[in-house]
Amino acid sequence: MKIQVLGTGCAKCNELEKLVKEVVAEKGVAATVEKVTDLQQIAMLGVFTTPGLVIDGVIKAVGAVPSKKDIAAWVK
């Protein structure tokens, strides 16, 4: 599983990255968590408001930090 946290380094982007890593560790999922900070690359993924969350190429969240419960539901 490939998880991409999209953001330039703002507080919400960092919070999302932290939550994603916590969920992956708690669930014991084999996943790669990648932080994407390049705005051009973020836009190419189809996200224009950060933070964003992309799991296996599917956009799951844009412009907000989803709850830990939501992240856990997406990470199976």
Image: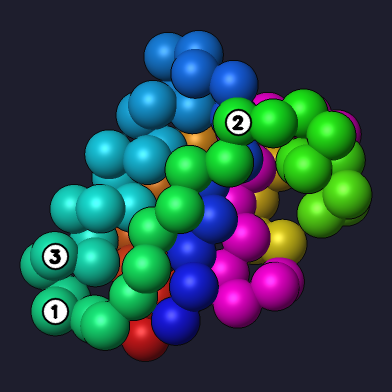
Residue displayed at 49% across by 18% down: 9
Q: Earlier in the sequence, mark 1 or mark 2?
A: 1
Specify the quadrant of the image occupied by residue 19: top left
Vertical arrangement, residue 4 with respect to residue 5, above or below: below
Name the residue tied to disc 2: 37
Circle 3 Cα neighbour tier, 10 Å, few/some/many (<14 / 14–19 / ≥20):
few
First to last magenta residue range: 48-58
Mark 2 crowd level (few <14, some 14–19, many ≥20, 10 Å Cα)? some
> Along the polypeptide, which appears first: circle 2 or circle 3?
3
Q: Are marks 3 and 1 in contact (CB under 8 Å)?
A: yes
Tell me if residue 12 can be seen: yes
Q: Which mark is residue 48?
A: none
- Residue 29, x across and y down, in percent: 24, 81
Relative placement, left or right, of 21 versus 3 is left
Residue tagged 3: 25
* Kind of residue at badge 3: Ala
Q: Which residue is mark 1?
A: 28
Neighbourhood count class around disc 1 (C-alpha, 10 Å): few under 14, some 14–19, many 20 upward: few
Figure quadrant of residue 6: top right
> What is the C-alpha distance between the residues marked 3 and 1?
5 Å
Where does residue 59 sit, x and y in percent of width and height?
72, 62
Q: Disc 1 versus disc 2: distance between alpha carbons?
A: 26 Å
Is 50 within the magenta? yes
